[in-house]
Image (cartoon, rainbow, N blue to C red):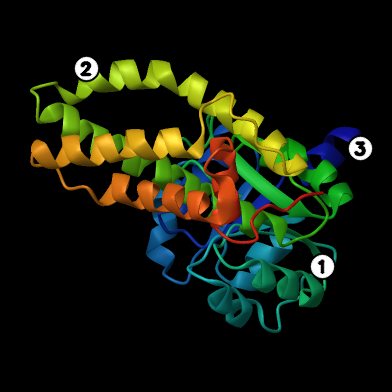
Amino acid sequence: MFENEERERSAVSVVGLGQMGARLAQAFLAAGHRTTVWNRTPAKAEALAARGAARADTLAGAIAASPLVVVCLPDYGVVTDLLAGADLRGRVLVNLTSGTPQEARRMAGGIGAGYLDGAAMSGTRLVGRPEALFVFSGDPDVFATHRPVLRSLGQAVHLGADPGLAAVYDTALFGLAWGALAGFHHAVALTGAEGVAPEEFAAVATGHMPFVTSLMTEHARQVAKGEYPDDDGTVEVHAAAMEHLVHTSAALGVRTDVPELVKALLDRAAAAGHGADGIASVVEAIGNATARV
C-alpha cells in the first residue's frame, strides 16, 4: 500500500509543451516520475510519449492523471482561459508561466486548488541538472509535500507564502543577469578591440566574479541598514573611474552606452548628496528600492 501511495504522489502532469514545457517533462521522466503530458497541438507530445510519457487526450484527462499539475504557457491570460471550468479539486497547480506578482496573487486566490507560482531561472539548457535554479512561492506545506518531485527540475527554492514572490524574483533576477551580461559584452568588445580573444577574457572574468558576488552580499547588508561605508570606494571615485572607461571605450571605437548608464547612476547619487558615501548608496538614486526590513 505504501509503495502505491508513494508512486501516486510522484505522478506529475505537464500542460504546455513548448520549449520549456518539453524540458520540464523530460526532467520528470528522467527522474523516474510517472509523467502525463498534454498540449493543444497533440503532435508536440509525440517525442515525449516515445520516451515513456503518458499522452492525455484532453486537458481534463491530464489533470485527473496526477495530483501535481505543472503548467507552462505563454502568459497568465492563456492559463486562465485554458483552465476555465477545469475541475482542479484535490490537485495542486504549479504555474511556471511568466507574469506579474499581481497576476500570480489573483490566480492563487481564484484557482480553487493548491497553488504554487514558480519561475525557471536558468533557461532551458540546465533543466534537470542540480545547478538549475527554480524558485517557487505559495503555501509552504504544499511546497514541502511536492518538493521531492519539483527538485527533479533542479534546485527548488521556496521563497515564502506570498504567491507573488516568485514573479518578483523572476523579474529581478532577469534584470540582474542582463545587467551583468551587458557589462560582460561591453568588456568583450573593449578587450577585443585590443586583440584579446573572448575566451581568454572570459577565463579571467569568471575568476573575478566571486569578488563581485561578495560585494552583493555586503551591499545588501548596507542597504538594509541604510549605511554606506566607503570601504569599496566612494561614489565620486567610481564616477571618475567610469568616466575613464567611457573615454577608453570611445577611443577604441567601442560604443559607450553601458558605461554611460552606470556613470549616470553614479552622478545622480552624487547629486543627491552621496558623493562621499560608498557605492551601495547608488540604490538611493534608483528609486525607493532601499526596501529596509
In the picture of the structure, the residue carrying the numbered disc 2 is 200
Residue depicted at 65% across the width and 46% down the height:
135
Q: Which mark is residue 113?
A: 1
241 vs 118, nearest the viewer: 241
In-image side of 270 versus 113 (left or right): left
Q: Is residue 15 above or below residue 192?
A: below
Q: Between disc 1 and disc 3, whose residue precedes?
A: 3
Residue depicted at 46% across the width and 41% down the height:
51
Tell me, yes or no, whether the two marked residues, 3 and 2, touch with CB atoms within 8 Å. Answer: no
Quarter of the image for residue 85 reads: bottom right
Q: Is residue 234 above or below residue 164?
A: above
Residue type highlighted by circle 3 = Met
Is residue 203 in sight in this rendering?
yes
For marks 1 and 3, give the one nearer the viewer: 1
Which secondary structure, mark 3? Answer: loop
Tell me, yes or no, whether the two marked residues, 1 and 3, touch with CB atoms within 8 Å. Answer: no
Residue type highlighted by circle 2 = Glu
Q: Residues within 10 Å of mark 2 (few under 14, many from 20)?
A: few
Quarter of the image for residue 213 reads: top right
Is residue 32 in sight in this rendering?
no
Residue depicted at 47% across the width and 45% down the height:
23
Residue type highlighted by circle 1 = Ala
For marks 3 and 2, give the one nearer the viewer: 2
In the picture of the structure, the residue carrying the numbered disc 3 is 1
Compute the Cα span from label 1 to label 3: 26 Å
Report x, y in % for residue 283: 58, 49
